Amino acid sequence: MKIIGHIHTDFPEKFGIPRQSGRIPSLLGYIDFLPEYRQLQAFRGIEDFSHLWLIWEFHLSSKDNWSATVKPPRLGGNRRMGVFATRSPYRPNNIGLSSVHLEDFLPESETGPRLLISGIDMVDGTPLYDVKPYVPYSDCHPDATGGFTDSIQSEHLDVYFPEELLHMFPSSKRSAIIQLLAEDPRPGFHHDPERIYGIYFAGFNVRFTISGKILRVVSVSPIDDCVLR
């Protein structure tokens, strides 16, 4: 398949990215397209849709071999499910599928047509294979069941984020980082209250601890580029 563009987000690495698209509506991103696909005719009518399906590549999760079963983190990391019954990035073909909100269509950005999107769940630079409109009359299934995911608790953490640290972020990013932390980015089998975790987000390294239902941010520092190499 041909890569048609790249998705740009505030996540330079995988840890901490929401487990599903749409979980945090305030997380913003944008899509720039390769020169061959910057024809305005290809986007005619797209601004009339509120949501889009994105088909993309788990380019940081590829493996030479695939496994028929995986361990979903939300099940504690010790229970196996069939790979086709999960959304694990480790699949026979490392293809991702996300439903995102179309915030705006910019037909004449500096890189040609650009899509501004929200509710993202991808790392920065993710290769994009296709864009399709979300069509409510056929894509929405109110009576759908969620299999083993119906039993997963989605309780949010209480986030203690000192004001002097929170204000290191631009105002447009503060709600997103708080919501991101409240989702509990740890794997389901991590429960060490002494452990310090870190998320790279929007140019900063946010370090925090979790005890019970309380998440405390202990430091925020600019990302050193060499750390990510």
Image (cartoon, helix red, strand yellow):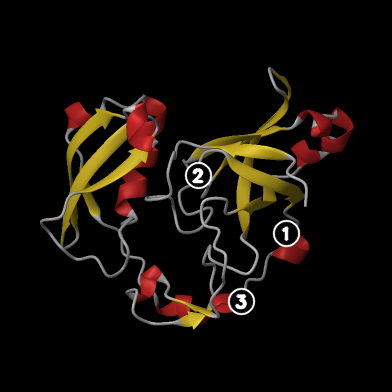
Residue at 31% x, 57% y: name it: 184
Which residue lies under the disc numbered 2? 123
Marks 1 and 2, Cα distance to the nearest angstrom? 27 Å
Residue at the extreme right of the image, as rendered: 41
Which residue lies under the disc numbered 3? 144
Q: Position of residue 85 (x, y in %)?
A: 56, 78
First in sequence: mark 1 or mark 3?
A: 1
Instruction: Give neighbour class at mark 2: few <14, some 14-19, many 20+ (Cα, 10 Å).
Output: many
**Amino acid type, label 2:** Val
* Secondary-structure class at tag 2: loop
**Amino acid type, label 1:** Pro
Judged by depth in the image, the label closer to the viewer, 3 or 2, is: 2
Residue at the extreme front of the image, as rendered: 64
Marks 1 and 3, Cα distance to the nearest angstrom? 14 Å
Q: Position of residue 32 (x, y in %)?
A: 67, 32
Instruction: Please indicate whether residue 34 sits to the left or right of residue 154 in the image.
Output: right
**Amino acid type, label 3:** Ala
Which residue lies under the disc numbered 1? 136
Quadrant housing residue 154 = bottom left
First in sequence: mark 1 or mark 2?
A: 2
* Secondary-structure class at tag 1: helix
Above or below: residue 129 compared with residue 93: above
| Quadrant in which the C terminus is drawn | top left
Residue at 74% x, 32% y: name it: 34
Judged by depth in the image, the label closer to the viewer, 1 or 2, is: 2
Instruction: Give neighbour class at mark 3: few <14, some 14-19, many 20+ (Cα, 10 Å).
Output: few
